[in-house]
Image: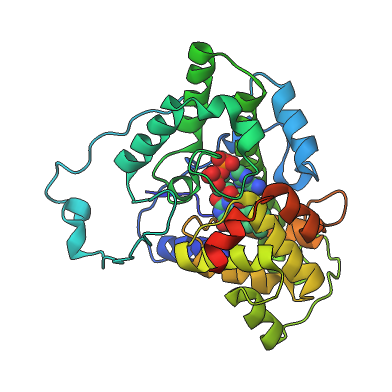
């Protein structure tokens, strides 16, 4: 049993397993909505996030399924997963002590983190804090657990609704669900655009320019561009595997519009570094910023000096990672 694979390689692998005669079952557990719930075919997927959101928000019958527990499969001694250490080579990844929110795998750790976040009531201020470059409760920090399937988007959605009933709903509590809809949109967008999302010209077929110059790419990836906000963020990524959403937007803007590099170099580098790498969110966001994806404005160019002044006015973030 596996989750419906999103990436091209994973899909080909699943097809190969099926072609070799192994019995396999694919389930859709990683999206908020099941395909049958969507009021359009993939080919008619709304072209932008706003249109997608309006369609799904307008129809009360499109509602994420209530999460259910699955039967305990570990009790049978014949199951190959009875002793995972026999068939999984542990990655032994070291979590950097510099990481602001220490992420370790598994559902228990995901739930512990999520419940702790809810208990701080930071969710009630999420819309105001979510663009911060650092801070353990400025955003939910759920991305790695969501990306690895330790917690489902449906569970998070359902818990937000409970929180709203208990603590009161406001723009911030809605906004975390809004961000989960972004995640959702990119998942269906990848399915609809298939391998074209990985092309230089993206699903739009538009030429974003940029080359694959090694020196400029090395400067960007190592955090040596000379633009201090970008360099600080890249060093945070290299040392911890994480970066806030705002920082991701800024370094992506720099790679495409200032380093003049092929946007796919940035996406591939993120893929190799992020602890929360998710094929749809990563490649979808990169294509969006490069203007070859679902952005109605045709790409996002950020004024990096202005952004640094706004989000790091006393340079705390830059000093921390550039020292
Ligand atoms: C260039 C670029 C690359 C990115 N690559 C990834 C990636 O590989 N994996 C990944 O999970 N996110 C990616 N994102 C989206 C976003 O930056 C992260 O999900 C977010 O920063 C994670 O922090 P959080 O869990 O505290 O988010 P919160 O702000 O607390 O949001 C809650 C959840 O909503 C989802 N979400 C939030 N923003 C977005 C978004 N813009 N697009 C899609 N989903 C979103 C995530 O699952 C996130 O965990 C990328 C964004 C950019 C601009």
60 left or right of 202 in image: left
192 left or right of 152 in image: right
Residue 291 position within the rendered picture, expressed as x and y whole percent measured from the top left: 82, 60
Q: Looking at the image, which residue is at 61% across and 60% down?
A: 318
Q: Nearer the viewer, residue 110 or 26?
A: 110
321 left or right of 255 in image: left
Q: Looking at the image, which residue is at 52% across and 29% down?
A: 122
Residue 51 position within the rendered picture, expressed as x and y whole percent measured from the top left: 80, 36
Q: How many marks?
A: 0
Q: Nearer the viewer, residue 106 or 244?
A: 244
Q: Looking at the image, which residue is at 34% across and 36% down?
A: 112
The answer to which image quadrant residue 222 occupies is: bottom right
Residue 203 can be seen in this image: no
291 left or right of 169 in image: right
Residue 232 can be seen in this image: yes
Residue 238 position within the rendered picture, expressed as x and y whole percent measured from the top left: 51, 69
Residue 313 position within the rendered picture, expressed as x and y whole percent measured from the top left: 69, 50
Placement of 263 over or under 304, stated as above or below: below
Q: Residue furthest front?
A: 314
């Amino acid at each position: 049993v596996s989750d419906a694979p999103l990436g091209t390689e994973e899909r080909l692998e699943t097809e190969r397993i099926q072609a070799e005669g192994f019995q396999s079952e694919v389930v859709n557990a990683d999206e908020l909505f099941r395909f049958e719930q969507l009021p359009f075919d993939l080919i008619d997927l709304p072209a932008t996030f706003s249109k997608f959101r309006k369609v799904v928000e307008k129809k009360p019958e499109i509602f994420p399924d209530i999460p259910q527990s699955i039967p305990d499969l570990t009790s049978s001694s014949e199951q190959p997963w009875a002793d995972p250490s026999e068939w999984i080579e542990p990655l032994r990844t070291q979590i950097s002590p510099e990481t602001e929110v220490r992420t370790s795998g598994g559902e228990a750790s995901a739930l512990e983190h999520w419940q702790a976040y809810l208990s701080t009531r930071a969710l009630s201020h999420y819309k105001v804090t979510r663009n911060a470059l650092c801070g353990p409760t400025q955003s939910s920090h759920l991305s790695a657990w969501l990306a690895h399937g330790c917690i489902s988007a449906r569970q998070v959605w359902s818990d937000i609704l409970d929180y709203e009933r208990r603590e009161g709903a406001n723009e911030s509590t809605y906004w975390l669900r809004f961000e989960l809809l972004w995640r959702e949109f990119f998942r269906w967008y990848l399915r609809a655009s298939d391998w074209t999302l990985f092309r230089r010209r993206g699903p739009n077929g538009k030429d974003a320019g940029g080359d694959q110059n090694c020196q400029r790419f090395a400067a960007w990836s190592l955090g040596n561009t000379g633009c201090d906000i970008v360099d600080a963020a890249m060093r945070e990524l290299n040392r911890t595997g994480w970066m806030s959403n705002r920082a991701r937007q800024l370094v992506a803007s720099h790679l495409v519009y200032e380093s003049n590099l092929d946007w796919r170099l940035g996406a591939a580098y993120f893929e190799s570094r992020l602890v929360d790498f998710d094929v749809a969110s990563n490649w979808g966001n990169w294509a969006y910023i490069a203007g070859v994806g679902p952005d109605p404005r045709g790409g996002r160019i950020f004024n990096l000096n202005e952004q640094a002044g706004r989000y790091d006015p006393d340079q705390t973030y830059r000093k921390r990672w550039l020292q």
